[in-house]
């Protein structure tokens, strides 16, 4: 009787269309504890600054500020020295190849230092051209952290970017693009930490899967006591 009531309750939930919790799938998680491992994990760094300066992406400097999580230097950073004096920064940090769809989202933390010089900007771009890491393939701008120089966050701030514009599963990459115009007067220092790309199943799909698994589990559990 208990088994029938339990299975019946699950069936009623499904019939009524009540949502069951769908579990998200983590596609990428990166804390930048050691950025020397990024290339081996499929990340790509491309500094297209003009002219190129003395730095690119580098391990976070805890003397400027500590990481959002983990060790004090456990974040990736860039600064105005990505370009030469009076140059323009265009520095790309590109994720590994991912399978993305309309239910995928990107979450990350970023900040600059207190009383920073103006002019820092971080963009997030999308490429749907498979494994290509050419910056020319990043044609969809998803986010500009400081597009109008209104003030880059001076404390760790989380941004969440949905990829709702995709019509279906596609293979591609996401990219962080640090930009500064005229480093003789603009630009300072930014950090990025705790990057996560995840995909959440639709509630109906998650509900069907949960019900199916629960029914199968309970059926097996209560049939073990029977002998044929």
Image (cartoon, rainbow, N blue to C red):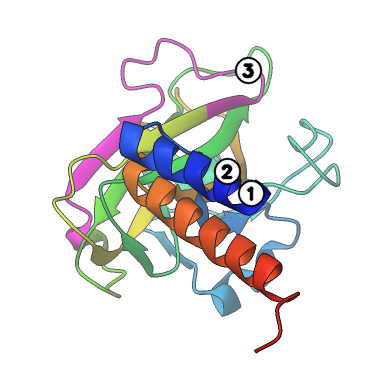
For the record, the magenta segment spans 136-158
**Which of the two labelled residues, at mark 1 and mark 3, occupies the earlier sequence position?**
1
Q: Residues within 10 Å of mark 1 (few under 14, many from 20)?
A: few
Q: Residues within 10 Å of mark 3 (few under 14, many from 20)?
A: some
For the point 29% across and 43% down, which residue is it? 163
**Distance of mark 1 from mark 3, alpha carbons?**
61 Å
Mark 3 or mark 2, which is nearer to you? 2
- Camera-side residue: 98 or 102? 102
Q: Residues within 10 Å of mark 2 (few under 14, many from 20)?
A: few
**Distance of mark 1 from mark 2, alpha carbons?**
6 Å
- Camera-side residue: 227 or 19? 227
Residue labelled with disc 1: 1
Residue 49: in sight, yes or no?
Answer: no
In the picture shown, does residue 183 fall above or below 116?
Answer: below
Residue 155: in sight, yes or no?
Answer: yes
Quadrant housing the C terminus: bottom right
Badges 1 and 3: C-beta atoms under 8 Å apart?
no
Q: Which mark is residue 154?
A: 3
In the picture shown, does residue 95 fall above or below 74?
Answer: below
For the point 68% across and 66% down, which residue is it? 222
In the picture shown, does residue 62 fall above or below 115?
Answer: below
Badges 1 and 2: C-beta atoms under 8 Å apart?
yes
Q: Which mark is residue 5?
A: 2
Horizontal and vertical percent position of residue 63: 84, 35
For the point 43% across and 23% down, which residue is it? 119
Under circle 3, the secondary element is loop
């Amino acid at each position: 009787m208990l088994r029938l009531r339990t299975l019946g309750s699950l069936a009623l939930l499904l019939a009524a269309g009540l949502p069951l919790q769908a579990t998200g799938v983590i596609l990428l998680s990166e804390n930048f504890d050691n950025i020397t491992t990024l290339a081996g994990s499929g990340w790509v760094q491309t500094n297209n600054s003009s002219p190129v300066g003395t730095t690119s992406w580098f391990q976070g400097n805890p003397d400027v500020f500590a990481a959002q999580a983990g060790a004090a230097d456990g974040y990736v950073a860039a600064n105005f020295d990505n370009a030469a004096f009076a140059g323009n920064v265009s520095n790309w940090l590109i994720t590994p190849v991912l399978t993305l769809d309309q239910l995928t989202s990107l979450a990350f933390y970023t900040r600059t230092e207190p009383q920073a010089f103006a002019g820092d900007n971080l963009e997030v771009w999308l490429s749907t051209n498979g494994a290509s890491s050419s910056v020319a393939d990043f044609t969809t701008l998803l986010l500009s952290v400081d597009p109008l120089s209104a003030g880059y966050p001076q404390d760790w701030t989380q941004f969440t970017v949905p990829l709702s514009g995709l019509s279906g599963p596609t293979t591609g990459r996401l990219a962080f693009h640090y930009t500064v115009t005229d480093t003789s007067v603009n630009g300072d220092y930014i950090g990025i930490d705790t990057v996560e790309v995840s995909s959440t199943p639709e509630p109906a799909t998650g509900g069907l899967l949960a019900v199916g698994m629960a029914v199968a589990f309970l059926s097996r559990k209560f049939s073990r006591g029977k002998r044929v």
